[in-house]
Amino acid sequence: MWTAAILAGGRARRFGGRDKSGLVLAGRTILDRQLAELRPLAARILLVCGPRLPVSPPPGVAVVKDRVHGAGVVGAIYTALLESATPLTAVVGCDMPFVSGRFLAHLAETAGDADVVLPRTQDGYEPLCAIYARRAAASILHRLDAGALKVTDLVGTLRVREIGPDEIAPYDPDGTLFLNVNAPDDYRRALAWANRTGPSPGQPVASE
């Protein structure tokens, strides 16, 4: 089994500081959509937050405060690994409405002895839709102590199992699996996809 950690401590400057996990698409918040994917598969779900903790945390979700203030995503990943009760933790951004639980389960199943199972698309690595081994916490802390706060800097210090486009493709037929709502234009794109009919984005497609 694996733990799922949703990182919700960002400042969301382009949304006026608004909690992006609460943005609504087709009648459900991004967080609700993520929880629907993760609950059937994850042993435990964490919500890693910044200084502001939610007043009403979702049922069955453990809300934890980021242990390394001001360290951004790398600090949040470190917090998630320290709080995880399982050897593997799926780390996802709170602004990714089309996260697929089955895709994350596939990453966990193929982790082997890797420190991180990291998807790579044509746009680059996707470190906020990846599986991290708890044992990687020590290496990540070393990077934090050195002031290396870019999440992509972790790639060179961890044992990586790379998931390339061909392995991703069956789980991402619409190209929306890694869509993240960074800005209002991204939100409009996500709304357009969420309001379409047909198979849910991120679900695996049967081969012919």
Image (tube, rainbow, N blue to C red):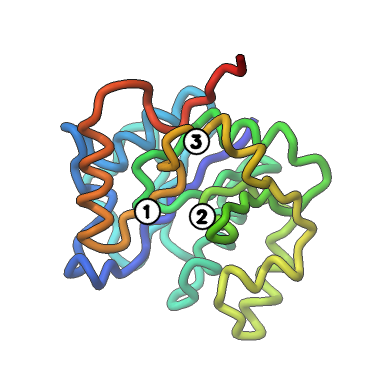
**What residue is pinned by disc 1?**
180
**Image side of residue 114 versus residue 26, left or right:** right
Q: Who comes first in sequence, dot 3 or dot 1? A: 3
Q: Which residue lies furthest to the bottom in this view?
A: 146
Callout 3 amino acid: Asp
- Label 3: state its secondary structure: loop
**What residue is pinned by disc 3?**
172
Callout 1 amino acid: Asn
Q: Which-is-in-front pick, marks 2 and 1? A: 1
Crowd class of label 1 (few under 14; some 14 to 19; many from 20; radius 10 Å): many
- Label 2: state its secondary structure: loop
The image quadrant that residue 152 belongs to is bottom right
**Image side of residue 143 versus residue 28, left or right:** right
**Image side of residue 47 versus residue 123, left or right:** left
Crowd class of label 3 (few under 14; some 14 to 19; many from 20; radius 10 Å): many
Crowd class of label 2 (few under 14; some 14 to 19; many from 20; radius 10 Å): many
How far apart marks 2 and 1 lie (CA) works out to 10 Å
In the rendering, at what x and y percent does residue 5 appear?
Answer: 49, 47
Callout 2 amino acid: Leu
Q: What number of labels is visible? A: 3
- Label 1: state its secondary structure: loop
Residue at screen point 78% across, 49% down = 114
